[in-house]
Image (spheres, rainbow, N blue to C red):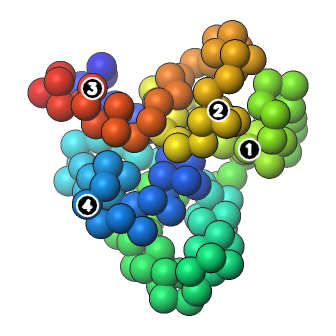
């Protein structure tokens, strides 16, 4: 593992960090706040998280999201352009997730963290030889701790 790994967060990880204050996703955000790892996520990830939290949990969880990301403003980057996303249309079954793969590549992540096993842990994606590793947040934390 790189001395300071660069990690791209999927929407599912950001949502998990809001819903579970003790979970792996929240720990990852805390590591980033302490500048022990570099995380990056896009404005589109924040928008998706906002939409999903509002729909399922209401305004109070959206407020939690905004409070959380306000400490991480430097980690929020512009979403990739559609033409960058289109590169992944044939690789991922849910085309709404193309921006996640494009973002991880665009921001040169070492790891893409996600809970979305259905769309990101597929044979097609494994065979795509992406320039980053796709991993569950808990597995990333275990690997990170094992190298320290």
Q: Is residue 103 visible?
A: no
Q: Which residue is identified by label 1?
A: 97
Report if the CB atoms under discs 1 and 3 are less than 8 Å apart: no
Q: Tell me the CA gap for discs 2 and 4.
A: 24 Å
Q: Tell me the CA gap for discs 2 and 1.
A: 9 Å
Q: Which residue is identified by label 4?
A: 22
88 in relation to 13, above or below:
above
Q: What is the x, y in percent for residue 112?
A: 51, 35
Q: Tell me the CA gap for discs 1 and 3.
A: 25 Å
Q: Which of the two labelled residues, at mark 1 and mark 4, occupies the earlier sequence position? A: 4
| Helix, strand or loop at mark 2 | helix
Mark identifier at residue 143: 3
| Helix, strand or loop at mark 3 | helix
Q: Which residue is identified by label 2?
A: 120
Q: What is the x, y in percent for residue 45?
A: 62, 58
Mark identifier at residue 110: none
| Helix, strand or loop at mark 1 | helix
Report if the CB atoms under discs 2 and 1 are less than 8 Å apart: yes
Query: Which quadrant, please, contains the C terminus?
Result: top left
Q: For this view, does 100 lie left or right of residue 98?
A: left
Q: Is residue 115 visible?
A: yes
140 in relation to 52, above or below:
above
């Amino acid at each position: 593992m790189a001395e300071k790994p660069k990690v791209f967060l999927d929407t599912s990880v950001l949502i998990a960090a809001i819903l579970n204050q003790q979970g792996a996703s929240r720990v990852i955000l805390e590591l980033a706040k302490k500048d022990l790892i570099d995380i990056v996520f896009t404005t589109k990830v924040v928008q998706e998280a906002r939409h999903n939290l509002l729909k399922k949990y209401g305004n109070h969880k959206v407020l939690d999201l905004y409070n959380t990301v306000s400490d991480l403003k430097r980690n929020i980057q512009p979403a990739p352009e559609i033409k960058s996303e289109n590169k992944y249309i044939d690789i991922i079954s849910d085309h709404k997730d193309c921006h996640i793969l494009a973002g991880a590549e665009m921001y040169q992540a070492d790891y893409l963290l996600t809970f979305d096993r259905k769309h990101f842990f597929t044979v097609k994606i494994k065979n795509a030889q992406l320039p980053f590793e796709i991993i569950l947040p808990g597995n990333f934390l275990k690997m990170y701790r094992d190298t320290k």
